[in-house]
Image (cartoon, coloured by chain):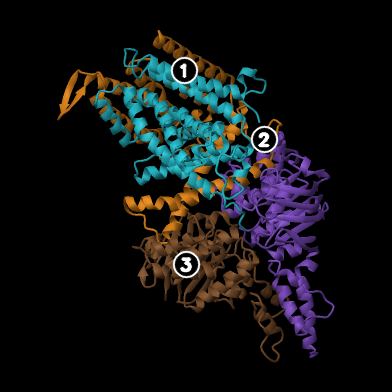
């Protein structure tokens, strides 16, 4: 399968692109913390641009690196996972429940096919939502990528073998999501643009004298771990319902014993 | 009359007319097959009976009540609808829970519920799978789970959408016996089907749809004459009917038993074949 | 709500419709970068009034364009004014009071600035989506040697979303036909599992078969794929794209340097 | 050309083999049908011959499968592209999703093979025409009805001109007219020298079209031969396969002396009409035994 360029120099091959992308994202985050954007540098202008460009570039690098390494079965899995994110997000949104649950597919892919595939699922899901529902999702691509990446890493560490540790993993994923998304919420969207509940929470934190980034981070740390823990629970329920043999198509989950062996896996006729 | 459909007209959102002035009535205990080419409006008509589609004009009355004001869930007490694709409804972690979903929604008392579930499992030959996750079963068995989950709702009317598609011989035989058994209990069965042999062997009456209108409606024994006249290739006559035509018989036959009787109306009744045909 | 319908069917005869999708993508990126690059609320307003809105009118999609903005931008802008107008940290120049709440000048000006940035970002991408057929966009990416896997994932997602939406409706009907009532918050919450189970399990179960079908049709085979559809392009557009991207890169560089200084 | 020798296969985590000691051959220009009950292993066999099982599913396989002389155990799936075509049971999953119109979807396989643009166009349009899809060529594949999707799935394989074609219940959602189109296309293929393996539930179509029939029951081949030999076998129902009404009628008639002696039980309308024609002639002459 082709990458962006066949004759790319070694420092641009797939593994390195994921590394560079992650580096750019972290550097952007560090830069945003360091400059203390409440200063005169023009909140919303240049700072927002820095966040936008850094995160987008990082996400692009991660996606291009991750996708190039995926086997065909995983490639076929990604659109379904992305679609599940979107459709579930929409259903939950219209059900009026105060939840997002728009990362079930991302977490599932992370667990089943590894961190790179998870990252690609998250980032591309944001791109698709950005292209079809609201461009407001585009800047969050990197958060979604990190959700999938973290899910894959925690799966590799064995946290999805038992339900309690899996729920804990969900909480950790939520912490990562909350921290990474805060600069986007704060600087690009001026702490607006989320759901009514999110906005109200942020307004409360700001009213208590927190800076914009801090308010957005706090909001993320309150809401995301809970949401992601529930997401993981649902993902585990789905994994249990998948037909036996399905998981055997994915070397990551098969060879690394990501999930507890199932006693009920006798092929039913 | 348990079902009265009067001048039913329906258009798709695209503006295409799917049903055009369809009227018919079905008596309790009748077995009615709705047949026609792909795109003739069969499934659309069936979906009106459970309230999934709403008529543009015309009325539908089920068990004496107009369906206009009734939701799908309310109609579900009277009409059980078995969808073509079982995967559109299987969600529970075991077959027995799946089959119990409908009776629970209809708030049957627990004892009655258990009784209905067990009897549905028995009728569909699913007892051995009762604790299996439905998605771990083969398509044919999943179709039976979907069927059982509707039977367990104990509705006076049962509508089957393409029940024999993707089913093996054993399942089709089981399905045929089930249709006969339901009718014997006084329940009304409607089916949408491509399978003409199944249709003549287990149903009393045929409604032929063509281009959204009723092209023919009458007893199953007389229907082949219509198809032979209208021959546009979209409907395939039952095997025995075609054989009868080839032998130059004037009155159509439909089933193996009917064929054998006609072949030799000699002494004694013809032995009833051991299997469904 | 459903812009996917538009992008899958965006057919039109205007000059903007006929542009290479990458030219429109470069335009959307460049106006967004430029809007964020200058701290003056008149600047994004100028970009919107002089470039984006006329382009939408010229392409004959102004109605859909404004409708999408009304659906997505207006609510975000309102929330922005409410939060930052009253609660911007460090603002103290009060211009109005509403009970215990104080509306502050810095907050309003910040909200105005940010809302206009988002306006340009959304407009640029709406313009791209409303005037570009998704198939042409994907073919254009393939021609630029973007990984076939990446193009596949995006294309398939765009098409499976509506298919899965239809399936969700079918499942809801099927469960209601089994007597499930979905009124009220509790009813809807309880309806989620019987809806999600079949929807998600079904979608994932399909993956194995779809992957096999794709592989037997040569997907992922090493030879260089060809393309049935030809995407129009021209020297002028190539030049325009280079110029726009140069402009965007310059704006970013100046800004990053300014921030870090 | 398909050769299978002593082949067994067990899915991962399964307790018993899906196929056990299967052996058969299908020559070029031959249409071989596979019948059997649910869970007999028919779809698995289709996967084996097209190379997706066990390459994609995992599991343990023993024995030899050769397609056009090549051992599939040593041939990667990509090595069979264009040579072996697989039409799956569910057309929704066969649609790649990578393309936005019916015409482009049919082109998908050709694009992956690197066929030049002009040649693609020349190959696609006749296929659309043969399958009656010309009217929907610019529609999205996902907007088609189930039957049309089934035709599209077949077309997307036909266009690649494979020399071995495997079809898994390709007409389940088609009405009589659609069925006729598909079987016509299969007939043309056979004339062109293509080897066809067809899984089918509709016995009548099959009895008229197949050169040979294999019966699978719980993973083993329990019978193979001409349609006339296999489909008239008394044990057919035990194997989970529906007997044709013609055969059932003739069997009952034979028990009452109403089927000509020495005439094999019929599996086609023609054979049944011939045999019962003799009977009715005889009865008309008043010759009653």
Q: Residues within 10 Å of mark 1 (few under 14, many from 20)?
A: some
Give the answer, above or below, for where C169 lies relative to A215.
below
Total numbered labels placed on residues in the image: 3
User: CA–CA distance between discs 2 and 1?
Assistant: 35 Å
**Chain the render paints orange:** C
User: CA–CA distance between discs 3 and 2?
Assistant: 48 Å
Q: Nearer the viewer, mark 2 or mark 1?
A: 1
Give the answer, above or below, for where A243 lies relative to D247.
above
Pinpoint residue B41: horizontal percent, then vertical percent.
Answer: 51, 61
Query: Toward which corner of the image does residue B70 lie, by quadrant?
Result: bottom left
Could you tell me which chain the residue with mark 1 belongs to? Answer: A
Which residue lies most toward the top here?
A: C261
Query: Toward which corner of the image does residue D99 lie, by quadrant?
Result: top right
Q: Is residue B270 left or right of residue B140?
A: right
Query: Which residue, given by chain and number where applicable, does mark 1 sit on?
Result: A27
**Chain the render paints brown:** B
């Amino acid at each position: 399968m082709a990458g962006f360029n066949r004759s790319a120099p070694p420092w641009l091959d797939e593994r390195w692109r994921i590394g560079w992308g992650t580096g750019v994202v972290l550097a952007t985050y560090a830069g945003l913390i360091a400059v203390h954007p409440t200063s005169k540098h023009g909140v919303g202008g240049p700072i927002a641009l820095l966040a936008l460009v850094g995160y987008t570039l990082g996400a692009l690098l991660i996606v291009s690196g991750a996708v190039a390494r995926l086997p065909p079965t995983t490639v076929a899995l990604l659109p379904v996972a992305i679609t599940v994110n979107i459709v579930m997000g929409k259903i939950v949104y219209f059900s009026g429940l105060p939840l997002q649950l728009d990362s079930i597919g991302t977490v599932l892919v992370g667990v089943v096919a590894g961190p790179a595939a998870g990252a690609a699922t998250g980032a591309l899901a944001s791109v698709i939502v950005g292209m079809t529902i609201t461009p407001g999702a585009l800047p969050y691509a990197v958060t979604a990528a990190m959700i999938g990446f973290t899910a894959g890493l925690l799966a590799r560490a064995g946290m999805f073998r038992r339900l309690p540790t899996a729920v804990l993993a969900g909480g950790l994923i939520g912490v990562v999501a909350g921290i990474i998304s805060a600069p986007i919420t704060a600087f690009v969207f001026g702490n607006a643009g989320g759901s009514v509940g999110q906005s109200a929470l942020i307004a409360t934190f700001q009213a208590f004298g927190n800076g914009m980034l801090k308010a957005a981070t706090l909001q993320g740390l309150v809401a995301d771990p809970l949401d992601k823990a529930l997401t993981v629970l649902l993902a585990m329920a789905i994994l249990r319902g998948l037909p036996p043999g399905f998981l055997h198509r994915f070397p990551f989950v098969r060879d690394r014993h990501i999930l507890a062996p199932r006693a009920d896996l006798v092929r039913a006729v | 009359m348990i079902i009265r459909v009067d001048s039913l007209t329906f258009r798709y959102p695209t503006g295409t007319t799917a049903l055009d002035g369809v009227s018919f009535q079905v008596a309790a205990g009748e077995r009615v097959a709705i047949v026609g080419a792909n795109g003739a409006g069969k499934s659309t008509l069936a979906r009106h009976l459970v309230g999934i589609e709403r008529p543009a004009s015309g009325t539908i009355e089920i068990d004496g009540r107009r369906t206009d004001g009734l939701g799908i869930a309310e109609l579900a007490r009277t009409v059980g609808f078995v969808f073509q694709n079982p995967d559109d409804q299987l969600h529970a972690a075991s077959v027995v829970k799946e089959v119990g979903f409908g009776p629970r929604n209809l708030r049957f008392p627990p004892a009655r519920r258990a009784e209905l579930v067990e009897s549905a499992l028995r009728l569909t030959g699913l007892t051995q799978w009762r604790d299996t996750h439905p998605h771990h079963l083969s398509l044919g068995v999943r179709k039976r789970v979907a069927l059982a989950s509707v039977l367990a709702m104990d509705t006076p009317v049962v509508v089957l959408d393409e029940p024999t598609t993707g089913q093996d011989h054993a399942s089709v035989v089981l399905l045929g016996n089930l249709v006969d058994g339901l009718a014997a209990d006084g329940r009304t069965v409607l089916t949408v089907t491509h399978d003409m042999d199944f249709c003549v062997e287990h149903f009393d009456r045929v409604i032929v749809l063509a281009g959204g209108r009723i092209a023919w409606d009458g007893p199953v024994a007389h229907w082949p004459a219509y198809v032979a006249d209208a021959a546009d290739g979209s409907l395939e006559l039952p095997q025995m009917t075609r054989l009868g035509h080839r032998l130059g018989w004037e009155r159509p036959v439909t089933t193996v038993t009917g064929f054998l009787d006609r072949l030799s109306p000699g002494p004694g009744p013809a032995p009833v074949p051991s299997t469904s045909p | 709500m459903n812009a996917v319908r538009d992008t899958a069917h965006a057919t039109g005869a205007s000059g903007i419709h006929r542009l290479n999708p990458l030219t429109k993508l470069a335009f959307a990126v460049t106006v967004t970068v430029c809007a964020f690059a200058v701290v003056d609320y008149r600047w994004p307003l100028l970009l919107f009034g002089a470039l984006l809105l006329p382009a939408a009118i010229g392409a004959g999609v102004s109605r859909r364009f404004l409708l999408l903005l009304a659906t997505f931008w207006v609510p975000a802008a309102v929330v922005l004014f409410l939060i930052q107008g009253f609660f911007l940290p460090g603002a103290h120049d009060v211009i109005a009071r509403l009970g215990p709440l104080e509306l502050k000048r810095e907050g309003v000006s910040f909200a105005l600035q940010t809302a206009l940035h988002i306006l340009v970002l959304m407009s640029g991408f709406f313009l791209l989506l409303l005037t570009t057929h998704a198939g042409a966009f994907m073919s254009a990416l393939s021609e630029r040697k973007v990984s076939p896997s990446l193009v596949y994932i995006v294309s398939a997602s765009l098409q499976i979303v509506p298919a899965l939406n239809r399936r969700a409706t079918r499942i809801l009907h099927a469960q209601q036909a089994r007597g499930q009532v979905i009124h009220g918050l509790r009813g809807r919450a309880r309806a989620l599992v019987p809806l999600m189970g079949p929807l998600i399990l079904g979608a994932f179960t399909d993956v194995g078969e779809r992957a096999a079908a794709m592989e037997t049709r040569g997907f992922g085979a090493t030879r260089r794929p060809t393309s049935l559809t030809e995407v129009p392009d021209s020297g002028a557009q190539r030049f325009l794209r280079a110029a726009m991207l140069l402009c965007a890169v310059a704006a970013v560089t100046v800004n990053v340097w300014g921030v870090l200084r | 050309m398909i050769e299978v020798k002593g082949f067994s296969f067990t899915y991962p985590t399964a307790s018993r083999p899906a196929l056990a000691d299967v052996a058969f051959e299908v020559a070029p220009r031959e249409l071989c049908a596979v019948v059997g009950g649910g869970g007999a292993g028919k779809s698995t066999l289709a996967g084996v011959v097209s190379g997706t099982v066990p390459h994609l599913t995992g599991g343990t396989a023993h024995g030899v499968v050769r397609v056009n002389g090549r051992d599939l155990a040593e041939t990667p799936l990509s090595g069979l592209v264009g040579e072996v075509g697989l039409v799956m049971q569910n057309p929704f999953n066969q649609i790649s999703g990578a393309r936005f119109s019916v015409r482009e979807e049919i082109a998908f396989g050709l694009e992956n093979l690197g066929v030049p643009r002009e040649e693609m166009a020349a190959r696609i349009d006749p296929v659309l025409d043969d399958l009656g899809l010309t009217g929907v060529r610019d529609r999205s594949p996902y907007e088609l009805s189930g039957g049309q999707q089934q035709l599209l799935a077949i077309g997307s394989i036909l266009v690649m001109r494979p020399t071995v074609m495997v079809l898994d219940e390709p007409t389940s959602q088609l009405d009589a007219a659609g069925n006729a189109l598909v079987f016509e296309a299969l007939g043309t293929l056979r004339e062109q020298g293509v080897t066809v393996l067809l899984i089918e539930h509709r016995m009548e179509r099959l009895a008229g079209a197949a050169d040979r029939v294999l019966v699978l029951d719980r993973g083993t081949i329990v019978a193979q031969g001409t349609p006339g030999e296999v489909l008239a076998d008394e044990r057919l129902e035990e194997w989970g396969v529906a007997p044709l009404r013609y055969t059932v009628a003739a069997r009952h008639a034979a028990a009452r002396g109403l089927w000509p002696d020495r005439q094999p039980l019929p599996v086609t309308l023609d054979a049944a009409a011939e045999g019962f024609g003799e009977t009715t002639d005889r009865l008309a002459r008043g010759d009653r035994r």
